[in-house]
Amino acid sequence: MTFLRLLNVQGIAGLAVGLALALLLVIQKGETRHWKKESDHFEQLHSQEQAALAGTIANYRAAAAQAQASDKANAERIAADQRTINERTSNDYEARLAAARSLAQRLRGQSAGAAADLRSGTGAAVPGLPAAAGGPHEAASQDRLPDSDRELATNQAIQLDELIKWVRAQAALDPNKKEN
């Protein structure tokens, strides 16, 4: 009988509310489990992405370090090649200048010796003098430079030639060429 007293409107409403709350509790527990699983799954994905990011960063750093080392080695190679070109050009220039000076010295010595032979009378017979030039002194040797200017012009020609060789050799260096 006491049970029947509970079956009035208030009792039935209480039971309905109790059942509804129990049902909501069960649903909430299910939702909690579902979102817990989803949270674990997302946490796992996040960890995997973090590990992938760390790997990518490590790969980029390694590649950058390798590129930097390669650039440094390449720069050292280019600098060594440039030093070699500079030394070779300088040595060639000095050798050519020395040869030109030696030749000029020898020619001056021959000229002086020939003049001395003519003065001493022991030289070969000299033909008569040609008619005097009609123009100023330079006209007699207009296609020739004076000795001092000839030597200077020769030195400058050698210098220019060696400079051209140096520029071509420097331009031929490929800074992007990979060493084997």
Image (tube, rainbow, N blue to C red):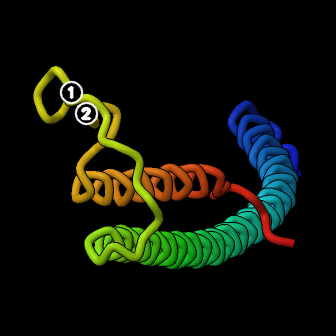
The C terminus appears in which quarter of the rendering? bottom right
**Residue in the picture at 61% in, 72% down:** 81
Disc 1 residue type? Ala
Work out whether residue 2 or residue 45 is closer to the camera in this orientation and state it: 45
Tell me if I can see residue 13 in this picture: yes
Image location (x, y in percent) of residue 1: 88, 51
Image location (x, y in percent) of residue 75: 57, 71
Report which residue position mark 1 lands on.
133
Work out whether residue 12 or residue 89 is closer to the camera in this orientation and state it: 89
Work out whether residue 119 or residue 158 is closer to the camera in this orientation and state it: 119
Q: Secondary structure at mark 1?
A: loop
Disc 2 residue type? Ala
Tell me if I can see residue 22 in this picture: no
Q: Secondary structure at mark 2?
A: helix
Q: Which mark is residue 140?
A: 2
What is the C-alpha distance between the residues marked 2 and 1? 6 Å
**Residue in the picture at 86% in, 53% down:** 34
